[in-house]
Image (spheres, grey):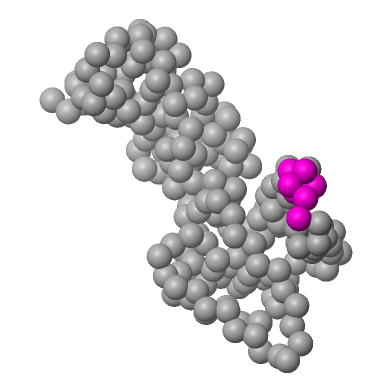
Amino acid sequence: MKTDTAGAVVRRGMNAVLVLPGRNPVTLSVTTSRCEFVYISTDMDALPPSAITLRGDITAAPISWERLAPLYAFVRAACMTAVVTRNDQNLDVLSSPAGEIVASLLRAMVHDLDCRGGLVGGAREVIRRHHTDANLTPSLVAERLGVSERTLQRAFAVERTGVQEELRRARAGRARRLARVYPHLTRAQLAELSGFSSLSALYRSLVDDTTTTQ
């Protein structure tokens, strides 16, 4: 099977292709008279964050069949279950493991690629999605990216900023937007909805932003 797109794509030999999110059209062409393949479409949130910033057409080592076989067997069985049984209860039971299977396959597609050049972009994507969670810290951002906090901080230092600063900026920006759209919200509510752990943290962040822009 042949996959053509002008967007970002990771090719793992002949047995697996990952097309990353984008607006470019994708064309799948069958190159033999007998060809069986599984097409999986998933939400962008399922992607490992460090993979989101990959660009271009990337060719990497094939994934071994030993690693792909269990995933393929499950997906194929799930498809047959959907077609044969038409049983909503069966499909509900399959939904949770199916998500884990897809996540495992995505990790296998990108686990050994050099994503360090996109590490800052990946961290910013994690922060963009989850900065409203007051429990999100620089160490947790690093954990989600599969790197040490020190490695992540070094990547941000090149850009003369830090992970905590990015978190603070994202939360302060959200607080300002909420205050404009919902002027009736109290400061305490703004802090909670924006991911600040305390009202004082919100005040400090807003003061720091004002000082920086003056």
Q: Is residue 188 left or right of 206 when viewed as pictured?
A: right
Q: Is residue 81 left or right of 194 when viewed as pictured?
A: right
Q: Nearer the viewer, residue 194 or 60?
A: 194
Q: Residue at x 42, y 70 (%)?
A: 24
Q: Residue at x 77, y 50 (%)?
A: 87
Q: Is residue 209 left or right of 133 when viewed as pictured?
A: left
Residue range corresponding to the magenta coloring: 86-92
**Residue 168 quadrant:** top left
Q: Position of residue 181 (x, y in %)?
A: 23, 26
Q: Residue at x 75, y 66 (%)?
A: 63
Q: Residue furthest bottom?
A: 33
Q: Is residue 160 left or right of 119 when viewed as pictured?
A: left
Q: The N terminus is located in which quarter?
A: bottom right
Above or below residue 193? Residue 156 is: below
Above or below residue 116? Residue 128 is: above
Q: Nearer the viewer, residue 47 or 61?
A: 47
Q: Position of residue 173 (x, y in %)?
A: 29, 29
- Residue 50 seen in render: no
